[in-house]
Image: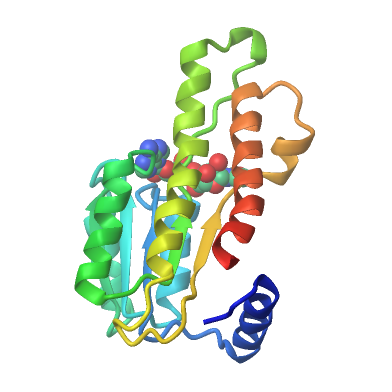
């Protein structure tokens, strides 16, 4: 166990130097994987290609998830793919799926917080409700991923995990977050997302 933040950074750098593209023995969760042409689905395949032990593919409802899980298991032998309905912006749903992964496999290694929504609404057409809906799905989901997946990734001694480690990936939108002028709530929600990721780095290494 590293005693200072500097030790921990050195430990992470040493670890990254040894990391291979393989996800052997690792357990992954992807949110927003139900869209047939979406980034979540494509990422589930990209993860499967690297041979993890298990991937949970999740979305608000079960649409397309069972078919996705079957296709992944058929294509990538040895990868367990579990479809699950998870509201990525619900505290209990996110902790529920993480607890399930931890109790079945003892570890969590990748959490892809991909679920998100965008609208083309302009500021003048937004309402308090539409703004808060966007915040809930795009920003709160990121906070929940970082908080709960980060805690689970710190757990060692189970599922063959020796050191606390893992990757929490959040899909922001650099262009829209910085310069796009009229997509108000989308831009704000992605900005929170980006700042949460920056501050979480410090949170989980100390
Ligand atoms: N497509 C792009 O050009 C682009 C660019 C930058 C960022 N992004 C971001 O990438 C992510 C995925 O985009 P996409 O183009 O694949 O979108 P998509 O609409 O194809 O997929 C998003 C998925 O998220 C799901 N979802 C929405 N709310 C949810 C919730 N509360 N809980 C669980 N699932 C929920 C939807 O059901 C959908 O399946 C989003 O966060 C988006 O903002 C996309």
Image quadrant where residue 121 sits: top right
User: In the current view of this chain or complex, which residue is farthest to the right?
Assistant: 179
Q: Position of residue 128 (x, y in %)?
A: 51, 12
Q: Based on the displayed image, in which of its 4 quarters is residue 82 positioned?
A: bottom left
Q: Position of residue 19 (x, y in %)?
A: 57, 87
Report the coloring of the rendering.
rainbow
Residue in front for this viewpoint, 124 or 13 = 13
Relative to 50, residue 118 above or below? above
Along the viewing direction, whichever of 191 and 114 lies nearer the viewer: 191
12 lies above or below 83: below
Q: Tell me the residue at 64%/30% (across/down).
A: 188
Q: Is residue 174 above or below residue 14?
A: above
Residue 188 makes an appearance in the image? yes
Horizontal arrangement in the rendering, residue 106 relative to residue 1 (left or right)? left
**Camera sees residue 67:** no
Q: Write the residue at 37% across / 73% down.
A: 155
Displayed quadrant of residue 47: bottom left
**Is 41 positioned to the left or the right of 138 in the image?**
left
Compared to residue 26, the image places residue 40 above or below, namely above
Residue at position x 22%, y 62% in the image? 100
Q: Percent x, y for residue 108?
A: 37, 70
């Amino acid at each position: 166990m590293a005693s200072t933040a500097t030790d921990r950074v050195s430990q992470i750098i040493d670890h990254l130097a040894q990391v291979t593209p393989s996800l052997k023995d690792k357990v992954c969760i992807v949110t927003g994987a139900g869209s047939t042409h979406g980034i979540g689905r494509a990422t589930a395949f990209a993860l499967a290609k690297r041979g993890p032990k298990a991937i949970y593919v999740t979305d608000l409802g079960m649409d397309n998830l069972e078919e996705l899980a079957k296709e992944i298991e058929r294509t990538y032998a040895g990868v367990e793919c579990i479809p699950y309905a998870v509201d990525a912006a619900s505290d209990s749903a996110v902790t529920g799926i993480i607890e399930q992964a931890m109790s079945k496999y003892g570890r969590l290694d990748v959490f892809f917080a991909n679920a998100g929504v965008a609208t083309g609404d302009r500021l003048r057409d937004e309402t308090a409700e539409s703004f808060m809906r966007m915040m809930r799905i795009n920003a709160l989901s990121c906070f929940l991923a970082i908080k709960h997946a980060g805690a689970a990734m710190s757990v060692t001694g189970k599922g063959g995990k020796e050191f606390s480690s893992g990757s929490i990936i959040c899909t922001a939108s650099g262009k829209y977050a910085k310069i796009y002028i009229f997509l108000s709530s989308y831009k704000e929600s992605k900005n929170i997302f980006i700042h949460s990721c920056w501050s979480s780095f410090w949170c989980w290494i100390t």
